[in-house]
Image: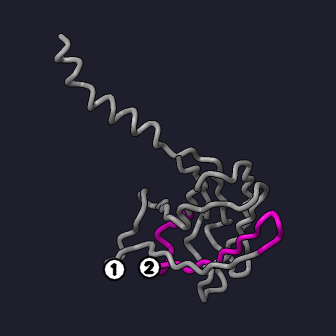
């Protein structure tokens, strides 16, 4: 009987390790575009309140597109403003489909694709961090993008 219990110790250890290393989602929000059209100058703002600036965080971009999206990728301009008012801009190119036109992500006619934007982020100050996102494609009205989202997870 004791041998059977010992046999399951690795299984319980693996289960415990998986639970303790889970990432806690501290922010997740989507912005929907009317009629799945993102106007070129339209900025989307996400305000994340960071109360604990000691752990590392992971920031994910969430994109929902439909079959009307005419491109394989999307360029995004992301402005990040700290509680102290410092600002930084990143330019990101996200591949949404493979070379054959098969969409990445989950879905059938509306695809949700999650991509890491920043990993092991250490926020220097507690407070509100603002992420402002605008599309950087050459189209005045970008058709086929229904939502853009941001998720921040606490990495344990």
Identity of the residue drawn at 49% across and 59% down: 112
Q: Is residue 63 visible?
A: no
Q: Earlier in the sequence, mark 1 or mark 2?
A: 2
Q: Which mark is residue 128?
A: none
Question: Disc 2 designates what residue?
Answer: 72
Question: Which picture quadrant has residue 42?
Answer: bottom right
Queried whether the magenta region covers residue 116, the answer comes back as no
Colouring of the image: one colour
Secondary structure of the residue carrying tag 2 is loop
Give 49 or 21, whichever is nearer the viewer: 21
Position of residue 100 relative to residue 153, above or below, is below
Question: Which picture quadrant has residue 135?
Answer: bottom right
The x and y percentages for residue 143 are 58, 76
Residue found farthest to the bottom: 138
Question: Disc 1 designates what residue?
Answer: 99
Residue neighbourhood size for the residue with mark 2, other residues' Cα within 10 Å, grouped as few (<14), some (14–19), many (≥20): some
Give 148 or 38, whichever is nearer the viewer: 148
Identity of the residue drawn at 76% across and 66% down: 82
Q: Which residues are magenta?
A: 61-86
Q: Is residue 22 left or right of residue 154?
A: left
Count of marks placed on residues: 2
Residue neighbourhood size for the residue with mark 1, other residues' Cα within 10 Å, grouped as few (<14), some (14–19), many (≥20): few
Give 120 or 37, whichever is nearer the viewer: 120
Question: Which picture quadrant has residue 36?
Answer: bottom right
The x and y percentages for residue 64 are 54, 63
Q: Is residue 145 visible?
A: yes
Identity of the residue drawn at 68% across and 81% down: 40
Secondary structure of the residue carrying tag 1 is loop
Queried whether the magenta region covers residue 85, the answer comes back as yes
The x and y percentages for residue 148 are 61, 64
Give 27 or 4, whichever is nearer the viewer: 4
Q: Do the numbered discs 1 and 2 sit on residues whose CB atoms are within 8 Å?
A: yes
């Amino acid at each position: 009987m004791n041998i059977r219990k010992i046999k399951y110790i690795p299984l319980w250890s693996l289960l415990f390790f998986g639970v303790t290393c889970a990432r806690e989602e501290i922010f997740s929000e989507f912005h929907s575009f009317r009629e799945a059209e993102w106007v070129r100058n339209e900025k989307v703002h996400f305000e994340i309140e960071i109360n604990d600036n000691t752990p590392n965080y992971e920031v994910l971009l969430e994109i929902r597109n439909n079959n009307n999206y005419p491109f394989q990728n999307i360029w995004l301009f992301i402005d990040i403003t700290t509680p102290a008012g410092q600002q930084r801009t990143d330019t990101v190119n996200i591949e949404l489909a493979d070379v054959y036109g098969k969409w990445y992500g989950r879905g059938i006619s509306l695809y949700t694709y999650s991509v890491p934007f920043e990993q092991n982020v250490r926020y220097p100050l507690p407070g509100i961090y603002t992420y402002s996102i605008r599309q950087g494609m050459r189209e005045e009205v970008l058709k086929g993008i229904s939502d853009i989202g941001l998720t921040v997870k606490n990495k344990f």
